[in-house]
Image (cartoon, rainbow, N blue to C red):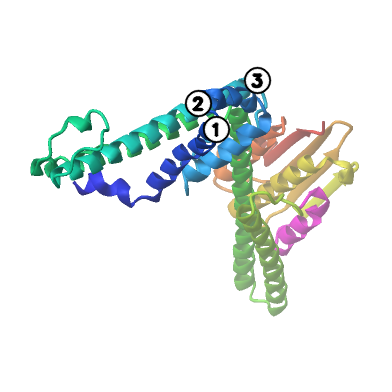
Amino acid sequence: MVRLLRPLLRGTTYTRLLHLWVPMLVESLWLFIDPARPWVPALVLVPLGLLPAVRLGEGVQARLLLTPGTRESGISEAPAATWRDRLRTVVWLELRWVLGWVTCLVSVRLLVTCVELARCAWGHVPSGTPPLDRLPPSPGWALLAPVPLLVLYGAVVGLGALVTVCARRLLGPSAAERLAALEERTEQLLERTRIARELHDSIGHALTVAVVQAGAARAAGDPEFTDRALGAIEETGRAALADLERVLGVLRETGRPASARPTLADADRLLESARASGATVDAEVTGPVAAVPGPVSREGYRILQEALTNVLRHAGAMPVRVRVAVTDDRLLLRVRNAMPEPVPGTGRGSGLRGIRERAALLGGSARTGPEDGEWTVRVELPLG
C-alpha cells in the first residue's frame, strides 16, 4: 500500500502534471476567442514544429518538468538538425496537445464526480451533470466518493509516465547525435586509458630509479656517492610529482588538454636519471629531434622511459646503449643492454607490452628480445 502511494511524495508527479497542463493554457485562451473551433491551435502547431529552435525549447522544458534531477534523461537539448527531427517535433507537439486535452477532461470530470457523490451523500440533489443527475440522494454515496480521486491519482501518474516515454522517443537524440555522443565517449575513454598508461610509466620509472639508487648508495658506503644518489632521487621524485599533478588535473577537468607533456627534446632528463642510478648510458641522437611531430615525440619519450625503466628494474646498473635517429619519415629508437643471468624470455611484463601498444597506436612497430647477445628494444614510428 505504501508503495502504491509513493508517487504522491515525488515532485516529479506534479511537475509532469504541470507539463501536461501547459498546452491547455493556450487552448483556454483560444476558447475565449473562438469556442466553436477548438482544433485551430492544433493546426498552428504543425508549422511551429518545423522551426529548429522549437525542438530545443521543447527539449529543455521536457527535461526540466518530466525528468527533473535526472542526468541521463534520454531527451535531447539541441535544435532540429534534419527534417526527420522537425517531423518528430511536429508529432510530439500534436501528441502533447492531445494528452493535455485528455488530462484536462479526466481531471475536471473526476473531480466533479467526487463532488457530486459527496453532495448526494449529504442529501443534496445532483446539479445536472449527466449521468450524475439521475442519482438519488443517499448516505451510501459517501463510500464511493473517494473512488474518483483514486482513479484521478492513477490517471495522473499513468499519463505522466506516458508523456515521459513519448518525450524520450520523439525528443530523444537523433542517430547523428547518438553517433556524436558515442564518438565523444570513445575519445574520453581512449584519453583516460592513455593517461593511465602514462601515469604508470612515469611513476614506475621514478620508483625504479629511486629503489636502484637507494640500494646502490647503501652498498657503496661512500658519503659522496650517497649525496649524489639522494640528489638524483629528489630530482626524480619532483619530476614524478609534477607528472602526477598534471595527470590528476586532466582527470579532474575533462575539457582540459594534457599539456606540457615531455617530449624527446627532454630525453636528457631520462638519461641523467639512469646515469645517477649507476648505469653507464651511451646515448647517440641523430637527426632533427625537435622537428618530430608532437604525438610521436611524446610517445617516443614514454617508450624510451619505459625501456630504461625495464633495464634498471630487471638488469640493474649496467651499461646501456641508446640510439635515437630521426629520418625523413621515421623515428628510430633502440635501447640495448647486456643480458643478466638468467636470460629473460621474450618479454618483461607489462612494460614491454606497453611499448608495443604505444607503437601500434601510432602505426609503428616494436621488437623486443635477445639480439647479438644483448637485450634489445627496437622501435620504429612513422612521422606522418
Q: Pick the residue in front: 271 or 242.
A: 242
Whole-percent x and y of residue 1?
18, 46
Q: From the viewer's perspective, is residue 201 above or below residue 173? A: below
Which circle's residue, 2 or 1, is located before the other in the chain? Answer: 1
- Is residue 93 something that shows in the picture? yes
Amino acid carrying mark 2 in the image: Pro
Amino acid carrying mark 3 in the image: Trp
Which circle's residue, 3 or 1, is located before the other in the chain? Answer: 1
Element type at mark 3: helix
- The verdict on residue 104 being magenta is no
- The verdict on residue 269 being magenta is yes
Specify the segment rendered in magenta.
262-280
For marks 3 and 1, give the one nearer the viewer.
1
CB contact under 8 Å: marks 3 and 1? no
Question: What's the residue at 67%, 27% (across, down)?
Answer: 81
**Circle on res. 83:** 3
The residue labelled by disc 1 is: 30
Amino acid carrying mark 1 in the image: Trp
Question: Alpha-carbon neighbours of circle 2 within 10 Å: few (<14), some, or many (≥20)?
Answer: some
Whole-percent x and y of residue 289?
87, 44
Element type at mark 1: helix
Question: Alpha-carbon neighbours of circle 1 within 10 Å: few (<14), some, or many (≥20)?
Answer: some
Question: What's the residue at 48%, 26% (across, down)?
Answer: 95
**Circle on res. 56:** none
CB contact under 8 Å: marks 2 and 1? yes
Question: Alpha-carbon neighbours of circle 3 within 10 Å: few (<14), some, or many (≥20)?
Answer: few
